Image (spheres, rainbow, N blue to C red):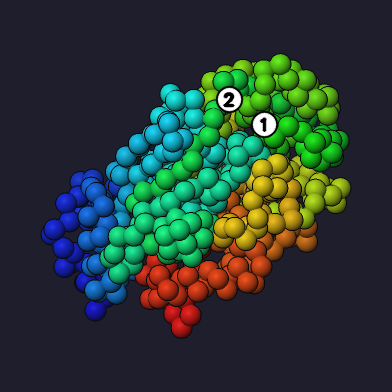
């Protein structure tokens, strides 16, 4: 029997909506961030109203041998949240947010988005280190690792995860933490959606600095070598409260940037500083002195606004393609590749909104120094810089243009990349990549063990898949 035939028996005890092609709300429900994958037609989208519904889906899937796709925030660029012909469990309505300010802990339902979490915590002067585009889901982001503007101060999102509640692929509810099912907890912290359906995540909430300065500092691309070499020297001794993502792109139409520079080739550090107000001017001045910026549009703003700065250049509903990896070092040779390929980027599909960007994320500080490589499945070993390349456009006829530029750039930078990397900031690069992306062979073997224990039939296969033994 095909999986779509089996799905006719989907249990009527499911309390939430069960949507099939042709149903009124199906089109909206299957829409995810990246329209590149939106031709896919899942057979059933089961919108869980509560955790019992997730148990119902998991038991049905186990009884019928049906693979399950998981949708949380819907930002996964691979589109694994909404695959063709699949049974999808949609967690986006699980929106619980419970803050315990005295304990410094927050519990979040798997459907919570970053801006919802940030807003709830900011009221208490708290923050969970997470990502940089506010419409991303906390569940998918955390299960891959989670990097953003607080990582140099507090570590990756997984480093701040205290426990998860999940439903196993045979339909059991479990809690997992350092003391409860610790091997599963280890694997979940980076191994993505391979092991169970996470319904709730509990985090350590950290103090949010009362002072935040943020913004952009674009330099003409001709200065990229000196600016990037300067950042390479500066970041290892910079305060942990300073986050920098250096974007090589066409200058976006952001309000503080004069219109004559929109769509110009730039290297544009995106800067967020969450340290002492008295130090801000010096730190921002240090960055500006790396070259002659077109404008230094970095200034005080509420955290909530700072963590939405990039929303404008990553709108939902476009076609996206991305790859990424860790640089062994930000050498002159690696800088050469990045700058040469930035200069060779195809024009923007809808100028002045950029279509091409290479981001150089400065790691270092807490994420690199305070947590052991083997403490979680997420890998950060022996790197200080993450390179990420993203293309976005609208017309399917342009697919080849942006794919070719991106893949050509990846081929050029590959000799400088490590075999470990960050699963969430790249589309899948195939089985050999997956065997190395979590770090050492011993870590991969431990992930395979966990997969074999918790999902022996690989029902969770719509992901950066770790096949079980004999699976
Ligand atoms: C514009 C944009 C900006 C981004 N910025 C950042 C950033 O700053 N930092 C960063 O670290 N990452 C960033 N990412 C990557 C992001 O972390 C991943 O795309 C992540 O998978 C998104 O999670 P989601 O819940 O929104 O996605 P979904 O598409 O809903 O989920 C992706 C996959 O995660 C797994 N998954 C999700 N929820 C669960 C669950 N509850 N239980 C088990 N498995 C689950 C499933 O395999 C699912 O297919 C960005 C992505 C985009 C598109």
Q: Kindly identify the residue that appears in the image at 38 percent across and 76 percent down.
A: 457
Residue 372, by quadrant, is bottom right
Q: Are marks 1 and 2 in contact (CB under 8 Å)?
A: yes
Answer with left or right where residue 235 lies relative to residue 103. right
- Residue that mark 2 sits on: 209
Q: Residue at x 74, y 56 (%)?
A: 382
Q: Kindly indicate the quadrant of the structure image that contains residue 60.
A: bottom left
Where residue 32 appears, as percent x and y from the top left, is 40, 47
Task: Check the picture and name the quadrant holding the C terminus.
Answer: bottom left
Task: Classify the position of the N terminus by image quarter.
Answer: bottom left
Q: Which mark is residue 241?
A: 1
Which numbered disc flags the more N-terminal residue, 1 or 2?
2
In the image, residue 56 sits, relative to residue 125, either above or below, namely below
Q: Nearer the viewer, residue 86 or 198?
A: 198
Instruction: Give the SS element for disc 1.
Output: loop
Residue 145 in percent (x, y) is at: 55, 51
Neighbour tally class for label 1: few under 14, some 14-19, many 20 plus, Cα within 10 Å? some
**Residue situated in front as seen by the camera: 10 or 279:** 279
Residue occupying the far left of the picture:
12
Ligand 1 has an atom within 8 Å of the beta carbon of the residue at disc 1: no
Q: How many marks?
A: 2
Mark 1 vs mark 2, CA separation in Å: 9 Å
- The residue that appears at 67% across and 61% down in the rendered structure is 420
Determine whether, in the image, residue 392 is placed left or right of residue 107: right
Image point (53%, 45%), residue name:
160
**In-front residue for pair 152/256:** 152
Q: Residues within 10 Å of mark 2 (few under 14, many from 20)?
A: some
Q: Is residue 179 above or below residue 256?
A: below
Instruction: Give percent across and percent down for residue 43.
Output: 27, 62
Determine if residue 134 is in view. Answer: no
Q: Is residue 181 visible?
A: yes
Residue 259: image location, x then y, percent: 65, 20
């Amino acid at each position: 029997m095909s999986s779509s035939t089996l799905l006719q028996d989907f249990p009527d005890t499911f309390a939430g909506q069960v949507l099939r092609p042709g149903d009124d709300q199906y089109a909206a429900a299957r829409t995810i961030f990246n329209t590149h994958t939106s031709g896919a037609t899942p057979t059933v989208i089961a919108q869980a109203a509560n955790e019992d519904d997730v148990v119902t889906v998991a038991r049905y899937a186990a009884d019928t041998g049906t693979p399950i796709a998981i949708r949380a925030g819907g930002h996964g660029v691979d589109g694994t949240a909404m695959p063709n012909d699949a049974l999808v469990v949609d967690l986006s309505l699980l929106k619980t947010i419970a803050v315990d300010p005295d304990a410094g802990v927050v519990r979040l339902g798997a459907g919570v988005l970053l801006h919802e979490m940030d807003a709830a915590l900011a009221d208490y002067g708290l923050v969970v280190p997470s990502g940089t585009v506010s419409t991303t889901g906390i569940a998918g982001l955390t299960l891959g690792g989670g990097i953003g503007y607080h990582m140099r101060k507090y570590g990756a999102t997984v480093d701040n995860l205290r426990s998860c509640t999940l439903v196993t692929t045979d339909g059991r509810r479990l809690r997992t933490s350092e003391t409860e099912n610790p091997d599963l907890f280890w694997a979940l912290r980076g191994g993505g959606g391979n092991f169970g359906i996470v319904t709730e995540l509990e985090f350590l909430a950290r103090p949010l600095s009362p002072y935040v300065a943020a913004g952009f500092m674009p330099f003409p691309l001709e200065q990229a070598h000196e600016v990037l070499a300067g950042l390479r020297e500066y970041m290892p001794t910079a305060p942990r409260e300073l986050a920098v993502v250096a974007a090589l792109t066409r200058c976006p139409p952001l309000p503080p940037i004069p219109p004559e520079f929109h769509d110009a080739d730039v290297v544009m550090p995106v800067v967020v500083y969450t340290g002492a107000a008295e130090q801000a001017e010096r730190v921002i001045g240090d960055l500006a002195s790396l070259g002659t910026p077109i404008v230094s549009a970095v200034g005080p703003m509420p955290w909530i606004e700072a963590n939405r700065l990039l929303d404008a250049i990553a709108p939902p509903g476009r076609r996206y393609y991305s790859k990424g990896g860790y640089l062994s070092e930000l050498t002159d040779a690696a800088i050469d590749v990045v700058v040469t390929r930035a200069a060779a980027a195809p024009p923007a599909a809808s100028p002045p909104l950029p279509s091409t960007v290479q981001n150089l994320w400065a790691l270092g500080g807490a994420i690199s120094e305070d947590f052991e490589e083997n403490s979680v499945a997420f890998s950060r070993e022996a790197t200080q810089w993450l390179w990420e390349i993203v293309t976005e456009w609208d017309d399917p006829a342009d697919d080849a243009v942006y794919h070719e530029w991106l893949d050509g750039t990846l081929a050029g930078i590959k000799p400088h990349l490590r075999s470990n990397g960050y699963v969430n900031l790249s589309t899948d690069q195939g089985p050999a990549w997956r065997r190395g992306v979590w770090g050492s062979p011993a870590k991969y073997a431990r992930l395979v063990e966990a997969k074999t224990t918790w999902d022996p039939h690989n029902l969770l296969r719509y992901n950066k898949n770790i096949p079980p033994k004999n699976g």
